[in-house]
């Protein structure tokens, strides 16, 4: 019965968003990304530039191309085994550009923890708590990936406002923002996932991230998604911020 409810909920998300049931079958289709962007559109009626940090297989980029069809999307994904899937899934959409490196606070290379469940891969080691809560995330391999600062790459990107910086980088969001000091004034919205419990070792939790982005000149708008444990504890929340006028 629980499986039927999950299928029903998935169908409802796609129907409510206007994407239709057939879009569920497309490569890179994502219920979570569709739901988050459906919620974001309520607060961001127009979007011309999306910086997609932690693009994975293009789930968010593809959903964004539906909700904001005129938006230019720049997707960053460091995992060498995932990047070809990102390229393949987004190849038909001319407004999506892809880059095979991570974003961070310093340029060079980075030790990266590649997870068998690619969504859980991070520049930070996974906590014991997450491995307990989500058993499918226990298989991890250390690799080295290239990393660049957003300040260094933004000169080659036309940041046409409004601009959204979306970060799905598993606890590394603060490092990306540190590497965007010079171009941050060109970013209108921030969307990132904040944890309420330590899912990764050394990650800043909600209170720290909220204070940090407020100091950068952004104000909280709304939560637009969340992750719950089987005991209904909220582990992480997708948060939307807007630059103060």
Image (spheres, rainbow, N blue to C red):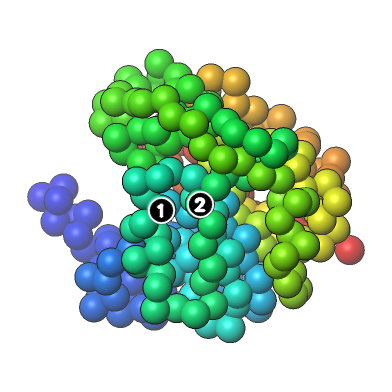
Say which label, 2 or 1, has the lower sequence index: 1
Residue 66 pos. (x, y %) = 46, 78
Residue at x-position 75% and y-position 42%: 179
Q: Nearer the viewer, residue 83 or 171?
A: 83
For marks 2 and 1, give the CA distance.
Answer: 6 Å
Q: Is residue 173 in view from this perspective?
A: no
- Are discs 2 and 1 less than 8 Å apart at CB? yes
Residue 95 pos. (x, y %) = 54, 77
Residue at x-position 22% and y-position 70%: 25
Residue lying farthest left?
1
- Quarter of the image for residue 22 reads bottom left
Residue 92 in the figure: left or right of residue 206: left
Numbered marks: total: 2
Residue 36 pos. (x, y %) = 49, 60
Residue at x-position 67% and y-position 63%: 164
Q: Nearer the viewer, residue 19 or 178?
A: 178
Residue 222 pos. (x, y %) = 63, 54
Residue at x-position 62% and y-position 66%: 50
The circle on residue 242 is: none
Residue lying farthest right?
245
- Mark 2: secondary structure: loop
Residue located beneath label 2 in the image: 100
The circle on residue 83 is: 1
Q: Is residue 140 in view from this perspective?
A: yes
- Quarter of the image for residue 18 reads bottom left
Q: Nearer the viewer, residue 84 or 134?
A: 84
Residue 161 in the figure: left or right of residue 3: right
- Mark 1: secondary structure: helix
């Amino acid at each position: 019965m629980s499986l039927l409810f999950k299928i029903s909920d998935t169908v409802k998300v796609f129907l409510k968003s206007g994407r239709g049931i057939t879009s569920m079958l497309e490569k890179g289709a994502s219920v979570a990304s569709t739901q988050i962007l459906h919620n974001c559109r309520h607060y961001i009626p127009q979007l011309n530039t999306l910086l997609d940090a932690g693009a994975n297989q293009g789930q968010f980029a593809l959903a964004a191309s539906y909700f904001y069809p005129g938006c230019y999307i720049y997707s960053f994904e460091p995992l060498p085994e995932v990047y070809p899937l990102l390229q393949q899934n987004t190849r038909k959409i001319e407004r999506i550009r892809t880059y095979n490196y991570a974003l961070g606070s310093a340029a060079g290379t980075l030790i990266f923890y590649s997870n068998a469940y690619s969504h859980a891969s991070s520049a930070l080691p996974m906590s014991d708590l997450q491995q307990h809560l989500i058993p499918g995330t226990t298989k991890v391999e250390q690799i080295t990936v290239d990393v660049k600062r957003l300040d260094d790459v933004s000169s080659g990107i036309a940041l046409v406002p409004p601009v959204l910086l979306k970060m799905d980088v598993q606890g590394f969001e603060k490092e990306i923002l540190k590497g965007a000091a010079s171009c941050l004034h060109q970013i209108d919205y921030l969307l990132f996932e904040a944890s309420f419990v330590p899912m990764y070792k050394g990650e800043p939790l909600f209170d720290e991230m909220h204070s940090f982005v407020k100091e950068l000149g952004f104000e909280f708008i709304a939560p637009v998604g969340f992750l719950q444990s089987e005991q209904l504890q909220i582990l992480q929340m997708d948060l939307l911020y807007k630059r103060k006028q």
